[in-house]
């Protein structure tokens, strides 16, 4: 594909394999993909590959072997002895992942000797949700919350005819361990609804492009499909006629796509239809779809993003953060085995800083999938460098209860809203590719060191890069999330963004909004009292010790103080500074850090392809402009509210 960035699979990363002799044993579609990858590398670099060469293998540097019939396993074993590196797997997906493991190792895969080591994903489902619209939405466009051009799948009301980009995308995803993709928006509009029935052939073509890389295709559906598509008078999940309609619709889907993954559903949320209209529970709704999918091996992912978006800002007892827990915790144990409750990692909406959702530790009888947001809706919209690996790692390692971490409790898998579009650099901002890669690797191993994953992405994306380039890239990306937090949202306050599009500062943008996200700043202080003693009681949704930690300002972590408490501007943080001085200091520091990162990137000219360097350099100018605007608006707002001057005498407007 001319003009399209190869991301983390440029030809150079295959050189260590492509210069050697490889034997591939086994058969099947995914073994064929492995052979195609190795054969392409050998054609470029002069090596040799044989398929099913019979007993032996001593003449080969690399042996990739499927042992027996393909059992669907994703595990593989890799070791090296007697001058030969061997990867074995009992499933085609495992062999494919084993190949990409060797690619990641590079020349180290062929040095010395090391005993066979097993590798298997910690989470069985590692999924991307695309919020892509088939027909262009008048407000949200082709891709809702998309910052990387148009959709890879859809254009102007129909499926794209050329699937070459989709195949290349599947290859990138497989290389970092992602195994499932939902191809349309969770907000299902009239055109998208028809993908379930008369337009399922378009989905089948996309599934065919993903299949060679072990990726199962999923579809977002509307709960009202029996009415919208079937002409029924009801979508009541307990109505026999409705259930029969879904069974027929699902059978049609699997006739077209035998390895179809299942449905993603947003119901009773932000205007989407759901079971509440019939006096039914979310378990009733999810289980109806699960029953239709179960005979075919499919899964329904039922999103827990359900809240009242018509709140009264005057009523301080209302709290959007409580909503997921209040709606779902009483349903624990009522969901079918093939129904997965998909929970956002925080209680609000993918803010730059919020606590882990208490629902994740409160439903032991339910399969939960944890949802992250790779698309940078609230973290700079892929115009700002903001590598989210450290944030995601903190979330996945967080010990929710009895030392069990979020990554261990996500038995239904890890899901991210995709940040990819048809931009030549895939993610708009070339460095935002690191977020997509990091998500895949953390989904495979939630306790992986994110810094190591970042170095892995740098090595793969810029093979044979000189040390100044690798060090510079690491420096620009590694602290970028905390830098973004510094010049935007202080101490856990979120949603101080422009309403609607969510880009840029607007301190009071949602302060009087029915969407229910407030900071309650006045002349005396700011923050939301979510304590049990005097506030909304949200802190009490956590089990111990977190309910006690968050309840008191004495023990609440500084970075979440204003999420859980309303305090004075002079309140002394654990860091030793006051709240108001922390706001001033961090916003000045954030801008300085962006200026420094911009200079580092400028120094890398000549070490990066000109088009890529120019794109990032231009985006750094926008990031710096935005950071200064954030700094000046936030500092001025809170200076005017508090009347407290900056202790260091810097200019505040």
Image: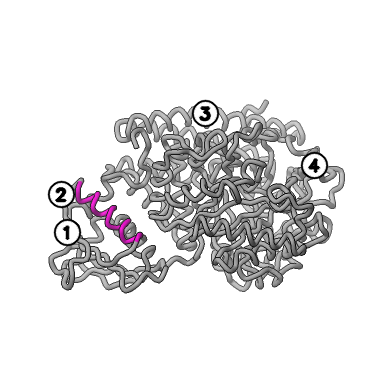
Query: How far apart in space, not on screen, are marks 4 and 3 (Cα)?
Result: 31 Å
Residue 532 place in picture, x, y as percent: 80, 61
Provide the residue designation for mark 4.
514
Vertical arrangement, residue 239 with respect to residue 523, above or below: below
Badge 4: few (under 14), some or many (20 or more) residues near its Cα, within 10 Å? some
Q: Quadrant of the N terminus?
A: top left
Residue 78 at x, y percent in the picture: 30, 68
Q: Residue 646 appears in which quarter of the rendering?
A: top right
Q: Residue at x 36, y 33 (%)?
A: 3
Secondary element type, mark 4: loop
How far, Cα to Cα, is label 3 from label 1?
48 Å
Q: Which quadrant would residue 288 be assigned to in this image? A: bottom right
Q: What is the C-alpha distance between the residues marked 4 and 2? A: 64 Å
First in sequence: mark 3 vs mark 2: 2
Q: CA distance from mark 1 to mark 4?
A: 64 Å
Q: Secondary structure at mark 3?
A: helix
Looking at the image, which residue is at 81% across and 57% down?
A: 278
Q: Quadrant of residue 73?
A: bottom left
Label located before the other in sequence (2 or 1): 1
Q: Identify residue for label 2.
A: 46
- Within the magenta stretch, is there residue 492? no
Of tags 3 and 2, which is closer to the observer? 2
């Amino acid at each position: 594909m001319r003009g399209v960035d190869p991301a983390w699979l440029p030809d150079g990363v295959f050189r260590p394999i492509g210069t050697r002799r490889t034997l591939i044993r086994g058969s099947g579609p995914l073994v064929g993909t492995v052979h195609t990858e190795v054969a392409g590398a050998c054609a470029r670099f002069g090596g040799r590959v044989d398929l099913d060469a019979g007993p032996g293998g001593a003449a080969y540097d690399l042996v990739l072997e499927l042992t027996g019939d393909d059992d669907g396993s994703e595990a593989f074993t890799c070791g090296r002895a007697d001058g030969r590196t061997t990867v074995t797997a009992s499933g085609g997906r495992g062999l494919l992942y084993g190949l990409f493991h060797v690619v990641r190792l590079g020349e180290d895969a062929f040095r010395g000797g090391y005993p066979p080591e097993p590798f298997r994903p910690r989470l069985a489902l590692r999924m991307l949700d695309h919020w892509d619209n088939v027909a262009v939405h008048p407000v949200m466009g082709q891709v809702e919350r998309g910052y990387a051009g148009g959709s890879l799948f859809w254009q102007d009301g129909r499926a794209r005819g050329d699937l070459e980009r989709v195949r290349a995308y599947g290859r990138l995803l497989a290389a970092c361990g992602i195994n499932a993709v939902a191809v349309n928006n969770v907000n299902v509009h009239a055109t998208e609804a028809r993908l379930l029935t008369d337009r399922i052939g378009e989905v089948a073509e996309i599934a065919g492009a993903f299949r060679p890389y072990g990726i199962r295709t999923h579809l977002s559906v509307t709960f009202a499909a029996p009415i919208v598509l079937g002409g029924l008078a009801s979508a009541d999940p307990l109505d026999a006629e409705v259930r029969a309609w879904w069974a027929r619709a699902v059978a049609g889907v699997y006739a077209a796509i035998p390895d179809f993954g299942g449905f993603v559903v947003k119901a009773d949320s932000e205007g989407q239809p759901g079971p509440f209209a019939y006096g039914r529970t979310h378990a009733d709704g999810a289980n109806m779809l699960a029953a239709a999918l179960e005979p075919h091996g499919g899964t329904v992912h039922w999103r827990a993003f359900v809240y009242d978006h018509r709140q009264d800002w005057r009523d301080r007892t209302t709290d959007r953060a409580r909503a997921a827990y209040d709606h779902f915790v009483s349903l624990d144990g009522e969901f079918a085995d093939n129904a997965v409750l998909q929970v956002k990692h925080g209680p609000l909406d993918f803010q730059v800083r919020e606590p882990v959702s208490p629902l994740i530790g409160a439903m032991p009888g339910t399969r939960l999938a944890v949802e992250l947001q790779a698309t940078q809706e609230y973290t700079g919209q892929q115009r700002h460098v903001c590598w989210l690996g450290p944030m995601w790692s903190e979330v996945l390692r967080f010990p929710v209860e009895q030392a069990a971490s979020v990554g261990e409790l996500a038995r239904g898998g890890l899901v991210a809203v995709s940040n990819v579009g048809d931009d030549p650099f895939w993610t708009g901002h070339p460095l935002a590719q690191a977020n997509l890669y990091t998500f895949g690797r953390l989904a495979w191993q939630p306790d992986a060191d994110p810094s190591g994953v970042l170095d892995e992405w740098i090595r793969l994306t810029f093979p044979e890069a000189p040390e100044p380039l690798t060090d510079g890239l690491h420096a620009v990306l590694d602290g970028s999330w905390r830098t973004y937090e510094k010049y935007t949202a202080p101490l856990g306050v979120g949603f101080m963004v422009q309403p609607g599009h969510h880009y840029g500062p607007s301190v009071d943008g949602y302060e009087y909004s029915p969407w229910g996200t407030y900071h309650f700043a006045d002349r005396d202080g700011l923050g939301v009292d979510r304590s049990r003693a005097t506030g909304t009681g949200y802190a009490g949704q956590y089990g111990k010790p977190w309910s006690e930690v968050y309840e008191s300002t004495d023990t609440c972590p500084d970075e979440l103080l204003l999420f859980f408490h309303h305090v004075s501007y002079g309140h002394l943080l654990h860091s030793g500074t006051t709240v108001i001085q922390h706001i001033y200091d961090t916003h000045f520091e954030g801008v300085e850090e962006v200026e420094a990162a911009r200079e580092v990137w400028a120094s890398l000219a000549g070490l990066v392809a000109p088009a890529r360097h120019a794109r990032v350099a231009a985006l750094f100018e926008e990031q710096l402009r935005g950071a200064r605007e954030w700094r000046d608006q936030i500092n001025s707002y809170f200076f005017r509210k508090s009347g407290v001057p900056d202790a260091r005498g810097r200019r505040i407007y």
